[in-house]
Amino acid sequence: MPSTKDTTNQTGRIMELWNGSWIAALAVGALVWGLLLWCIVAYRRRRDETGYPAQIRYNIPLEILYTVVPLMMVSVLFYFTARDQSEINSITAKPDITINVVGKQWAWDFNYLGPDAKDPADDVYEVGLQGQLDGTPGAEAGLPTLYLPVNQRVEFVLTARDVIHSFWVPAFLYKMDVIPGIENRFQVVPQREGLYKGKCAELCGEYHSEMLFNVRVVSAEEYQQHLADLKAKGQTGTLDANLGRSDTPEGGRGAIPGGGRNGGANDLGSNS
């Protein structure tokens, strides 16, 4: 269950909606349980009663009541859900950084794009390998790790190579589908440094349970150092979403003929 409101700029809003919904549901449940118990006690059959009680076919005021009240309850819940969902899904703000997450069976690649996601000069990438959950301690160390700078707005661009996946960081209380041929986007501002767990939340094949990754929220200086380390390893450019799951060549922007960035010319940048 969620317990920390300031993990990201949205976790507090999500928790308030969640808790408010539970409080409303429990209040309605208590009312219904109370009415049921009252009816059981007040209208129970007495020892000296015979035959059937008076039969009533309808009660117009009561029927109007139990039609209008649920509509009002659903309308209120819909209002708060739509309000918060619109805010959470908004990508109108200018991001500080853009990261393209590429889902593949059964791991993740991370393309750290330039500040405006147009100029490829500063792009670097991280190649993800499938987790090996064989019971050996320390398996998490081999998982792909996504680095995020604390207190900076990150825009995620989600693409897939093969089947539908779902990018989920449970601590962020948010997930989004990763669909072949479609770019899904969302923004978030991580607010607490630390190591978080991530996973695929869409059944995507035989090793879905091993499609895991880490998220490390660090200072801006440590984030820039990580990008510099990737560049020093020669991991410059981007890994394309058109790559097969078993073919991830080293180096080269796009890593396929034509140098397309994640499926060809799109909002991420033009081919070169």
Image (cartoon, rainbow, N blue to C red):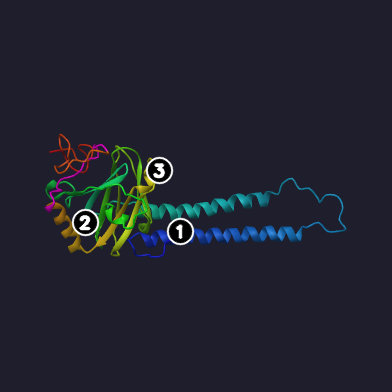
In this image, 56 relative to 18: left or right?
Answer: right
The total of numbered circles placed on residues is 3
- Mark 1 or 2, nearer chain start: 1
Asked if residue 218 lies left or right of residue 65, the reply is left
Residue 233 located within the stretch drawn in magenta: yes
Residue 38 x/y as whole percent = 71, 61
- Disc 1, SS: helix
Dot placed on the residue nearer the N-terminal end, 1 or 3 = 1
Tag on residue 96? 2
Main structural element of the magenta stretch: helix, strand or loop? Answer: loop
Which residue range is magenta in the image? 232-244
Alpha-carbon distance for marks 1 and 3? 25 Å
Q: CA distance from mark 1 to mark 2?
A: 29 Å
Q: In what quadrant of the picture does the N terminus appear?
A: bottom left
Element under disc 3: loop
Residue 188 seen in the current view: no
Give the amino acid at mark 2: Asp
Q: Nearer the viewer, residue 208 or 194?
A: 208
| Residue 122 at x, y percent in the picture | 13, 50
Q: Which mark is residue 18?
A: 1
For residue 258, above or below residue 58? above
Residue at horizontal 62%, vertical 60%? 31
Residue 65 visible from this viewpoint:
yes
Rendered view: 34 above or below 252: below
Residue that appears at 35% across and 57% down: 172
- Can you identify the residue that label 3 sits on? 203
Distance from disc 3 to disc 2, alpha carbons, whole Å, reads 32 Å
Q: Position of residue 92 (x, y in %)?
A: 27, 51
